[in-house]
Amino acid sequence: MTPGSPGNSSSPSSAFLLSGIPGLEHLHIWISIPLCIMYLISILGNCTILFIIKTEPSLHEPMYLFLSMLALTDLGLSLCTLPTVLGIFWVQARDISHDACFAQLFFIHCLSFLESSVLLSMAFDRFVAICRPLRYASILNNAVISRIGLAALGRSVVLIFPLPFMLKRFPYCRSPVLSHSYCLHQEVMKLACADIKANSIYGMFVIISTVGVDSLLILLSYILILRTVLSIASRAERLKALNTCVSHICAVLLFYTPMIGLSIIHRFGKQAPHLVQVVMGFVYLLFPPVMNPIVYSVKTKQIRDRITHAFCY
């Protein structure tokens, strides 16, 4: 009996079934090649960023400490999804137990919202550096940076911690097939044979209180930055100040664009082709960890010089 058949819809399922790319199952082994390359770039790129910042004393500054937080978060996101994604594309290992699925979605959502907090912290760093340059070192000292990091981690853990328990109390008697190669709260809850209104409301509250608030504060910080930059008389100085923000703006766009797109598709795009959901899911979780180290290596001279020196000498 296949998943999703009528006989399966009335009996509780003991596991969920993850999905690869529908209709292209015969090509999964070939599709796994670019996926492996992307995971390799993500892991090596973020580890390189962390190694360079740790071993180079001149980079022990607020901007680079926040960048190391971003790299650590991206590394965690890649490692969270790597086993199930490659398991599906290599050996068609689709089954995942409920507890393993709940654990995976906890780490995925926790790290995603942690990344949002880190991006907000980096925006605050750019705001202080450009708008309050004389007080930069006193405002963003190591103790303050540590507290910001712990607060960001604490907020993510506290908000996401209830989700696995809210999902665990449900019976699951519908077709256990998930749309992605990993577990997400907004998808798992739809498989429950119970009223999911509380989960839906709480999920919306979490998104608004994290991604919604963070994105608005990032926008506000750049409005203030732009106002300060436009007041600088020298055109060269204006360009220099704005250039320090380019990498962060790219990271913000790489993170928020696919996240918002995937959330809209899950909540409102019921008529969207299934392939669109799958592709957006991969973009959401793979693109930021892959592209962030590339962007910062290319656009940040200090990082670029250290990487060049490490590999060429």
Image: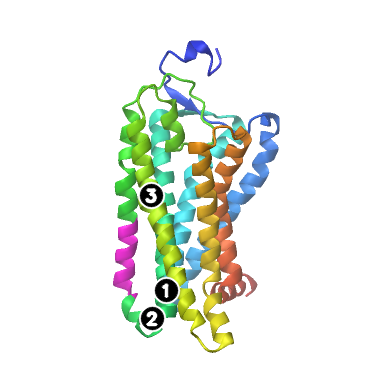
Question: x and y percent of residue 23 in the render?
Answer: 67, 29
Q: Which residues are magenta?
A: 140-152
Question: x and y percent of residue 60 in the render?
Answer: 42, 74
Does residue 221 appear to the left or right of 282 in the view shown?
left
Does residue 259 appear to the left or right of 66 in the view shown?
right
Contact (CB < 8 A) between labels 2 and 1? yes
Mark 1 residue crowding within 10 angstroms, few (<14) / some (14–19) / many (20+): many
Magenta span: chief secondary structure: helix
Q: Say the numbered circle drawn on residue 188.
A: none
**What separation in Å lies between label 3 and label 1 (alpha carbons)?**
23 Å
| Above or below: residue 223 compared with residue 178 | below
Q: Say the numbered circle drawn on residue 132.
A: 2
Q: Amino acid at mark 3?
A: Ile
The residue wearing badge 1 is 127
Q: Amino acid at mark 1?
A: Phe
Element at badge 2? loop
For the point 38% across and 31% down, the residue is 99
The residue wearing badge 3 is 208
| Residue 193 visible in the shown view | yes
